[in-house]
């Protein structure tokens, strides 16, 4: 085998990676990749010699021009991914030949300014909401695990929870926990590089960087981030190039031991349109869900907010509102905000009658036709009518294929549309154990990924449920 150790030793090796480590990483890559390749085609891969690293660029020498073209077209992406995994940070592969030296030489001129010049301006300090802290977060059975993990991360004791992935239906406190983590972390490490970004904003920023041909600079800005908070990561679903960049940044930060926290409206395994390699990385640390709060927690949330707003709230009023709003904390707090405003403006005390008016007005704004507001029972009836399945079979023990599919669709629609708790769905379907409906939901989600006709039918039912 050809070696060029003397030349390799003179290369500038970023992040203390020496020539021996590169050769060892390359051997591991070949061992992983060659079994997938026909014997007649392996000679090109086995002829490649790794000759060095400049920054995040790995140079591989293959003298045959035809061989270089063949490998690049078929295996460049696989080689980059495997090498990145072996080296612990994302790399880009550059193929060269013996006659390509003049082309390679200018590389230090291009790379050196990136290394020696002042780094890109740091991300601006996140503007966290001072009201969204751990002190104002009401802990209950539905969110205890997520809260404890978030607190551990903020205190620097969450090494096992990396990444921390928090998921729930909208409006249950995911964003609150991200803001709380960020503020507590900066109180502990005031000069830390913390980035708080939504999945949608990450997508927009990457598209803009690509248009301006600054994708490399985009990634480089993240290199020294110590805490990466990503809200609503599901927005990158279906965006292949954005997911590719997200994957590299994730690997770069996670490999360097930086803390990652992400939120989504679904568990990683249920994120349709997100690549498998990303979903499995989201599950590397701790996945914690937040369920709809129970009545006691909803009452505590209302009392807590009323205290912060300096408004006396009788307990019976809190119970009344909490009984009407069951699945969304934002709506719950929105109703209370409206009630306090009405009381302040009119000078009336907070009474059940005033609470009823505020609640009714808020719900009318949210749903112009209250009679058409989706309910669990209405969704089940709709599924039975549209799919031709008797209601007693849907809620019974029938294992007919069409009934099983209808049951899975019903569970999916109820959970996705109105966010009912698993125990409530199980009860409505005549099940004693909520794990059976959880299994039905997962089966429906899996089938939706691969069955376009089923997706179309479910979309039609969702539109009908929502009026």
Image: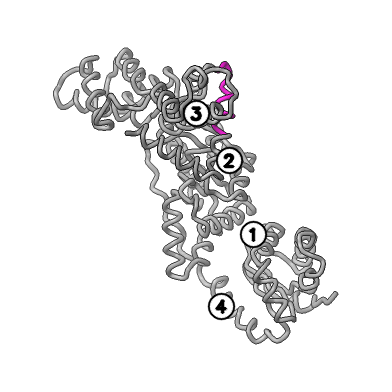
- Asked whether disc 3 touches disc 1, contact meaning CB atoms under 8 Å apart, the reply is no
User: Closest to the observer: 138 or 398?
Assistant: 398
Q: Nearer the viewer, mark 2 or mark 1?
A: 2
For image coordinates 45% across by 39% down, the residue present is 457
Residue 450 position (above or below residue 68) = above
Q: Secondary structure at mark 2?
A: helix
Quadrant of the rendered image containing residue 59: bottom right
Pick out the residue farthest to the top: 316
User: Callout 2 environment at 10 Å: few (<14), some (14 to 19), or many (20+)?
Assistant: some
Q: Is residue 2 left or right of residue 231?
A: right
For image coordinates 51% across by 37% down, the residue present is 167
Q: Is residue 245 visible?
A: yes
For image coordinates 45% across by 48% down, the residue present is 235
The x and y percentages for residue 139 are 47, 25
User: Callout 3 environment at 10 Å: few (<14), some (14 to 19), or many (20+)?
Assistant: many
Query: Is residue 454 magenta-colored?
Result: no
Residue 42 position (above or below residue 364) = below
Q: Secondary structure at mark 3?
A: helix
Q: Nearer the viewer, mark 3 or mark 1?
A: 3
- Asked whether disc 2 touches disc 1, contact meaning CB atoms under 8 Å apart, the reply is no
The x and y percentages for residue 94 are 65, 73
User: Callout 4 environment at 10 Å: few (<14), some (14 to 19), or many (20+)?
Assistant: few
Q: Is residue 197 visible?
A: no
Residue tagged 4: 110
Cα separation between marks 3 and 1: 41 Å
Quarter the C terminus occupies: top left
- Asked whether disc 3 touches disc 2, contact meaning CB atoms under 8 Å apart, the reply is no
Q: Nearer the viewer, mark 4 or mark 2?
A: 2
Query: Is residue 436 magenta-colored?
Result: yes
Cα separation between marks 4 and 2: 41 Å
């Amino acid at each position: 085998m050809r070696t060029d150790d003397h030349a390799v030793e003179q290369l500038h090796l970023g992040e203390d990676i020496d020539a021996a480590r590169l050769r060892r990483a390359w051997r591991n890559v070949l061992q992983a990749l060659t079994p997938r390749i026909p014997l007649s085609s392996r000679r090109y891969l086995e002829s490649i010699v790794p000759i060095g690293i400049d920054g995040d660029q790995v140079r591989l020498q293959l003298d045959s021009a035809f061989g270089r073209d063949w490998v690049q077209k078929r295996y460049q992406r696989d080689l980059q991914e495997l090498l990145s995994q072996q080296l612990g940070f994302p790399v880009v592969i550059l193929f060269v030949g013996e006659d390509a030296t003049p082309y390679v030489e200018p590389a230090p001129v291009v790379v050196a300014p990136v290394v020696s010049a002042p780094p890109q301006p740091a991300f601006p300090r996140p503007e966290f909401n001072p009201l969204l802290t751990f002190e104002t977060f009401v802990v209950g059975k539905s969110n205890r695990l997520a809260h404890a993990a978030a607190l551990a991360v903020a205190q620097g004791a969450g090494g096992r929870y990396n990444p921390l992935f928090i998921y729930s239906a909208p409006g249950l406190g995911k964003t609150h926990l991200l803001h709380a983590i960020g503020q507590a972390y900066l109180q502990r490490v005031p000069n830390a590089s913390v980035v708080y970004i939504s999945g949608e904003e990450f997508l927009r920023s990457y598209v803009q960087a690509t248009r301006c041909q600054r994708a490399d600079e985009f990634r480089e800005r993240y290199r020294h981030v110590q805490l990466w908070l990503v809200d609503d990561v599901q927005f990158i679903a279906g965006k292949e190039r954005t997911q590719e960049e997200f994957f590299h940044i994730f690997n770069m930060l996670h490999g360097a031991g930086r803390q990652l926290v992400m939120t989504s409206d679904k568990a990683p395994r249920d994120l349709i349109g997100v690549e498998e390699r990303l979903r499995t990385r989201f599950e590397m640390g701790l996945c914690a869900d937040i369920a709809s709060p129970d009545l006691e927690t909803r009452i505590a949330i209302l009392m807590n907010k009323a205290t912060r707003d300096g408004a006396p709230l009788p307990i019976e009023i809190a119970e009344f509102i909490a009984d009407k709003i069951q699945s969304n904390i934002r709506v719950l707090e929105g109703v209370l905000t409206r009630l306090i405003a009405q009381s302040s403006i009119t000078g009336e005390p907070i009474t059940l009658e005033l609470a009823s008016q505020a609640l009714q007005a808020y719900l009318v704004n949210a749903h112009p036709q209250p009679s058409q507001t989706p309910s669990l029972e209405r969704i089940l009836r709709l599924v039975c009518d549209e799919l031709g399945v008797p209601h007693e079979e849907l809620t019974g023990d029938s294992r007919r294929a069409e009934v099983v599919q209808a049951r899975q669709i019903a569970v999916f629609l109820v959970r996705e549309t109105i966010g009912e708790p698993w125990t409530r769905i199980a009860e409505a379907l005549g099940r004693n154990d909520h794990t059976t409906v959880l299994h039905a939901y997962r089966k429906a989600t899996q089938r939706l990924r691969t069955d376009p006709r089923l997706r179309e039918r479910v979309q039609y039912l969702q539109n009908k449920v929502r009026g």
